[in-house]
Every structure is written in C-alpha cells, then in structure tokens.
Image (cartoon, rainbow, N blue to C red):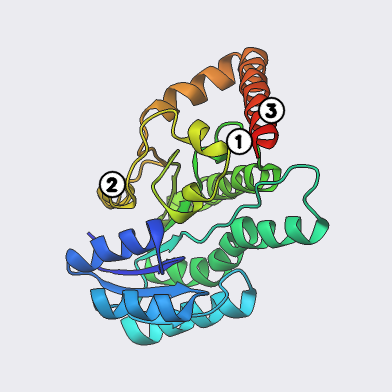
Amino acid sequence: MPDTAVVNGAARGIGRAIATRLAREGWQVVVADLDAAELATTAEQIGAVAVPGDTSTDSGVRHLVDTAHERLGHVDVFFANAGIGTLKGLDASDDEWTRILETNVLAHVRAARHLVPRWLDTGGGRLVVTASAAGLLTMLGDAPYSVSKHGAVAFAEWLSATYRHRGIVVQAICPQGVQTRMLDGSGPLKDLLALDATLTADEVADAAFRALSGDEFYVLPHPEVSGYYAQRAAHPDAWLAGMNRLQQKLDHQTADQQENA
C-alpha cells in the first residue's frame, strides 16, 4: 500500500479524519487548508507537515505539490478534499458561483495538472476526490454545490478513463450526511441530508482508507447511494418528481419557520 499522502481541506471534518487515519497507519502526511491556525493544530496532533494556503488557486496548488515533494520525496495519494457550499439557488451571485466552481471543481483540475505529469514519469499515483452524493444525485437547496459536485465527479471520471492504463487510479468519495460543521450549518436541509443515517467523519475516513487497497472508482460510505443512483438513471422523471415532492416539503417547513420566527 502507498505510504505518502497529501490531504487538503484537512483542518477539520472529513479531511482531518482522513489525515489522522493515514498518520495512525504510519503514513507520511502533508496537510493543507485555508485556516492556518486550525491546520497547525491538526498537523501537530497527528505528526503531519502543515502547508497553509488556498488550494483552489493554481499558485496555491503548485506550492502544495512542490512542498509535498520536497518534504516527502514523492506523493503516492492526493486527497482533493476541500469543498464549500452556499445554501443558495438562483439567488447565488456570479461571484459565489465562481468561488464554488474554483474550490469544488477547478481545484481538482489544477491539482491534476501538477500531479499527473509527475505520476506518469514515476509509474503512477492516486487522486481521491471528495465529491459527495450530491455529485451523483440531485442536491436540493444549493444549486452551486450540486452543479459543482457533479462537475467534480465528471472530471474524476474523465481522468480515470484517460489515464488508468498508465498507472493512475482515480476515486470519488460520495457520502451523504456527515457529522461536520457543514451539516450543522445546512439549515432546513439538515433533516433531508440526515434522512439515512449520518456518519461521523471518522467513518468516512475509514471507508476512504479501505478503498486505497483497490481501484474501485466510487467510494460510497452510505451504501444506499448506489441504489438511489441506479433509480435516478433508470427512471429520471420519477426521480425528479420525487425530489420535487421533497422540495415542496422543504418549502412548507421554511414557511412554517418564518411564521413562527
């Protein structure tokens, strides 16, 4: 099994849990995040190298990849884990759409640009994208998040189809509700995201770690997602009708909350 990894979005949540699990297994780990203070705490606690910065930008990704190679000698696995949402629909501004797409999609593109050529020279590597079940299903209440996570899955699929015969493994982690700060701040969507059991970040990290022993593209910590995905593909109109019924329920809940506020 590989023994060096980079994890971005690692100051908290799923990224921190993945980095912690890898370090506990004896891996050498580089962690990255915008939150330099919290990242430093994580790195100190697990014995990782902290590289604070904005990994949604090309310069930030380049600095992270270059530093990781300097400190580790090579990067076996890159966990593209950073992600953000808006909880907005048509009211999301162009600037908000740009920020979401930069973080949730283009950050993966930029990471691949800097990693893939090195991996092709050295015989291979692995990119693991935290995409969310929103990248496979229909995410209500947050259009930029839903669109960007679909884009993240699509790019990961393209990478896998293009480079798997050259030793590059690409995987997409697609959980539903996870007990993180993002779930806590999801407002009326929280009950929907927790419709199936919510998992801890550690449980998602366990699933991610197990997946490193194989090359399956989808990593589904919530196994129900596989059935939902198949249903969506086989019966798209019925799926969308069902999602619309859920949206109507959310509308009623929001109206009730506003009346009682």
- In primary-sequence order, the first of circles 2 and 1 is 1
Give the quarter of the image for residue 55.
bottom right
- Amino acid at the residue labelled 2: Glu
Q: Is residue 51 left or right of residue 136?
A: left
- In primary-sequence order, the first of circles 3 and 2 is 2
Of circles 3 and 1, the one toward us is 3
Farthest residue toward the front? 260
Quadrant placement of the N terminus = bottom left
Q: In percent of the image, x 39 and y 73: which residue is there?
A: 31
- Could you say whether the residue bearing mark 2 is in a helix, strand or loop? helix
> Is the residue under label 2 in contact with that under label 3 (CB below 8 Å)?
no
Which mark is drawn over residue 251? 3
Pick the front one: 219 or 197: 197
Quadrant placement of the C terminus = top right
- Could you say whether the residue bearing mark 1 is in a helix, strand or loop? loop
Question: Could you give the CA–CA distance between mark 2 and mark 1, rounded to whole angstroms?
Answer: 22 Å
Question: Could you give the CA–CA distance between mark 3 and mark 2, rounded to whole angstroms?
Answer: 32 Å
Where does the image place residue 125, in percent across and percent down from the top left? 39, 62
Where does the image place residue 205, in percent across and percent down from the top left? 31, 52
- Amino acid at the residue labelled 3: Asp
Give the quarter of the image for residue 189.
top right
Residue of label 2: 203
Where does the image place residue 170, in percent across and percent down from the top left? 44, 51
- In primary-sequence order, the first of circles 3 and 1 is 1
Residue of label 1: 139
Question: Could you give the CA–CA distance between mark 3 and mark 1, rounded to whole angstroms?
Answer: 15 Å
| Mark 3, other Cα within 10 Å: few <14 / some 14–19 / many ≥20 | few
Q: In percent of the image, x 63 and y 42: which residue is there?
A: 146
Pick the front one: 186 or 106: 186
Q: Is residue 16 visible?
A: yes
Of circles 3 and 2, the one toward us is 3
